């Protein structure tokens, strides 16, 4: 069960990097509570998988390459239908530019997952940005 939970979270990052938008939408529950604490944003939003893809896709497609590296998975709660998992993450965004070609974001995540008929789905995501570096104008 633990591996299945970690796999869903890993797929979210990999599908984002691959621009696999159908796969990305499939890792989410029908409604997802999203909170990304980045650049003063402190407002939680409830979104559908399609809304998440529509919000992330234009940002990710601005770059020639995006790479998320995650680790330090810790299952904080788990039962047959609910799990809370945290991990650390670094995302590196690359686009050749005369002012600098890299934008890096580092922080930690907490995911809430629910077991549904087709398996585990992400129902909540909180991202706490620790710092950003590089060319912030790239995004």
Image (spheres, rainbow, N blue to C red):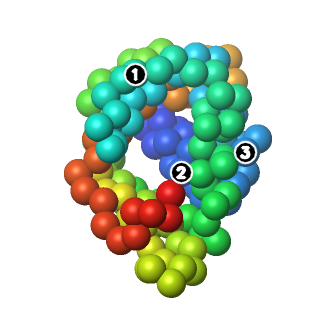
Q: Nearer the viewer, residue 20 or 119?
A: 20
Mark 2 = which residue? 13
Q: Nearer the viewer, residue 56 or 124?
A: 56
Residue depicted at x 30% and y 60%: 132
Give the Cα distance between marks 1 and 3: 22 Å
Residue 97 falls in image quadrant: bottom right
Circles 3 and 2 in contact, beta carbons < 8 Å? no
Q: Nearer the viewer, residue 107 or 84?
A: 107
Mark 2, other Cα within 10 Å: few <14 / some 14–19 / many ≥20: some
Give the Cα distance between marks 1 and 2: 20 Å
Circles 1 and 3 in contact, beta carbons < 8 Å? no
Q: Earlier in the sequence, mark 1 or mark 2?
A: 2
Percent x, y of residue 65: 60, 70
The answer to whether one can see residue 43 in this image is: yes
Percent x, y of residue 77: 30, 24
Mark 3 = which residue? 21
Mark 1 or 3: in front is 1
Q: Mark on residue 32?
A: none
Mark 1 = which residue? 44
Q: Residue furthest right?
A: 22
SS label for mark 2: helix
Give the Cα distance between marks 3 and 2: 11 Å
Q: Earlier in the sequence, mark 1 or mark 3?
A: 3
Percent x, y of residue 88: 31, 51
SS label for mark 1: loop
Mark 1, other Cα within 10 Å: few <14 / some 14–19 / many ≥20: some
Mark 1 or 2: in front is 1
SS label for mark 3: helix
Q: Earlier in the sequence, mark 3 or mark 2?
A: 2
Image check: 70 left or right of 108? right
Q: Residue furthest left?
A: 130
Residue depicted at x 53% and y 51%: 13
């Amino acid at each position: 069960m633990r591996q299945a939970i970690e796999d869903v979270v890993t797929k979210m990052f990999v599908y984002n990097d691959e621009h696999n938008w159908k796969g990305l939408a499939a890792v989410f529950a029908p409604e997802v509570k999203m909170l990304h604490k980045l650049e003063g944003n402190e407002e939680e939003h409830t979104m559908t998988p399609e809304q998440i893809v529509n919000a992330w896709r234009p940002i990710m497609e601005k770059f020639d390459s995006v790479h998320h590296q995650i680790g330090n998975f810790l299952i904080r709660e788990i039962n047959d239908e609910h799990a809370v998992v945290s991990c650390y993450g670094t995302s590196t965004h690359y686009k050749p530019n005369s002012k600098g070609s890299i934008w890096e974001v580092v922080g930690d995540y907490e995911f809430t997952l629910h077991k549904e008929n087709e398996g585990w789905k992400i129902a909540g995501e909180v991202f706490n940005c620790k710092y950003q570096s590089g060319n912030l104008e790239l995004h």
